[in-house]
């Protein structure tokens, strides 16, 4: 009996030591793996960033790190996380989609956006027009999108963060051009009457324009438009910069509740901080995103970013105000006529 008791005590001590040093088989994989739930057009960006992050971890002696990705329309991705998709970090298209993880899911704190520099947005983009070879419809600015016979491709603002940036950029231009909110709403109603199909996300809209050949102009993230020029040179598409666009800032955040449950908080924080390093900023520019620290990027990469007049989400009172006014149930977007332009 004494021998059995001694053996049992030794076994308990060994178990405690393994637990203390994090050596159990069940803990190590979760602590070395992350799930980044992102929005639609960031596949190529995070493939490059994840590779560089894993290489940096290896160099620092932290081997075996794995970063997995999930992509889709930003609003749909936020709802998936609320419904149980166990993201350690989210890198979504707009701040509102991360806010709901606090207000509805209690997964992150209310001050999440102040935890990282530049409102937790390590890169930004803007909205441009992608047109067919030779710009046969003569698209030069927002007003040209509602000319007879012009078909516009944009995703659905109910599910796509990129679509909301498109909508707000168009609204800002129309309000300045015509001088009133009522006129801006009329312009948006006419604009959406020129949209033959509403995809759920920005990448889906790009595929509709490029692969299915629908539409005369694609309202696109600048990074997505530049990617099309690189990957589909045979299409002969051209980028048109409107007279006014919007500074589109896709933020990033730690999902505290999930990261703590997975034991991955330190790795997730390391990953998010990595996005602000010189290495990551240069990768962002090479992948067609405007870095917040342009001095870290190659000059040839920065040369592709044309100066452009932009409004910001602050001009709309922030994302909570913009969502309530334009995109919430019974908001302005819900009241736009669904009449199809012949």
Image (spheres, rainbow, N blue to C red):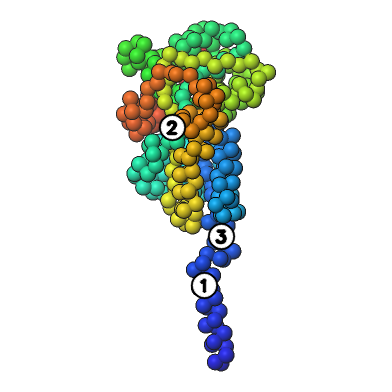
Q: Are marks 1 and 3 in contact (CB under 8 Å)?
A: no
Q: Nearer the viewer, residue 45 or 221?
A: 45
Mark 1 or mark 2: which is in front? 2
Vertical relation: 310 (above or below) 177: below
Mark carried by residue 17: 1
Horizontal and vertical percent position of residue 14: 54, 76
Horizontal and vertical percent position of residue 242: 46, 15
Q: Looking at the image, can residue 100 be seen?
A: no
Horizontal and vertical percent position of residue 142: 45, 13
Q: Circle 3 — which element? A: helix
Mark carried by residue 292: 2
Horizontal and vertical percent position of residue 193: 48, 16
Image point (40%, 21%), residue name: 310
Image point (43%, 32%), residue name: 292
Q: CA distance from mark 1 to mark 3?
A: 15 Å
Q: Which residue is mark 3?
A: 28
Q: Are marks 2 and 3 in contact (CB under 8 Å)?
A: no
- Left or right position of 163 against 118: right
Q: Pick whichever of labels 2 and 3 is earlier in the sequence.
A: 3
Residue 311 sits in quarter: top left
The extreme bottom residue here reads 1
């Amino acid at each position: 009996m004494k021998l059995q008791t001694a053996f049992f005590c030794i076994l308990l001590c060994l178990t405690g030591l393994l637990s203390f040093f994090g050596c159990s088989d069940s803990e190590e994989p979760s602590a070395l793996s992350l799930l980044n739930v992102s929005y639609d057009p960031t596949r190529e960006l995070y493939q490059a960033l994840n590779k560089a992050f894993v290489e940096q971890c290896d160099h620092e002696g932290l081997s075996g790190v794995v970063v997995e990705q999930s992509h889709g329309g930003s609003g749909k991705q936020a709802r998936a996380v609320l419904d149980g998709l166990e993201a350690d970090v989210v890198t979504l298209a707009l701040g509102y989609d991360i806010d709901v993880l606090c207000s509805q899911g209690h997964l992150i704190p209310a001050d999440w956006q102040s935890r990282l520099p530049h409102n937790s947005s390590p890169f930004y983009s803007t909205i441009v027009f992608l047109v067919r070879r030779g710009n046969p419809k003569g698209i030069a600015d927002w007003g040209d999108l509602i000319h007879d016979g012009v078909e516009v491709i944009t995703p659905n603002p109910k599910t796509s963060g990129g679509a909301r940036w498109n909508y707000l950029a168009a609204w800002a231009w129309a309000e300045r051009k015509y001088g009133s909110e009522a006129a801006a709403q009329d312009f948006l109603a006419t604009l959406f009457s020129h949209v033959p199909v509403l995809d759920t996300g920005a990448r889906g809209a790009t595929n509709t324009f490029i692969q299915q050949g629908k539409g005369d102009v694609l309202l696109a993230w600048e990074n997505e438009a530049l990617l099309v020029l690189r990957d589909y040179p045979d299409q002969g598409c051209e980028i048109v910069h409107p007279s006014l666009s919007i500074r589109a800032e896709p933020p990033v955040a730690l999902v505290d509740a999930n990261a703590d449950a997975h034991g991955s908080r330190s790795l997730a924080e390391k990953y998010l901080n990595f996005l602000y390093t010189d290495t990551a900023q240069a990768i962002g520019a090479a992948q067609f995103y405007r870095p917040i620290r342009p001095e870290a990027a190659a000059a040839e990469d920065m040369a592709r970013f044309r100066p452009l007049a932009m409004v910001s989400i602050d001009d709309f009172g922030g994302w909570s105000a913009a969502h309530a006014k334009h995109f919430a149930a019974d908001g302005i977007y819900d009241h736009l006529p669904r009449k199809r332009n012949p």
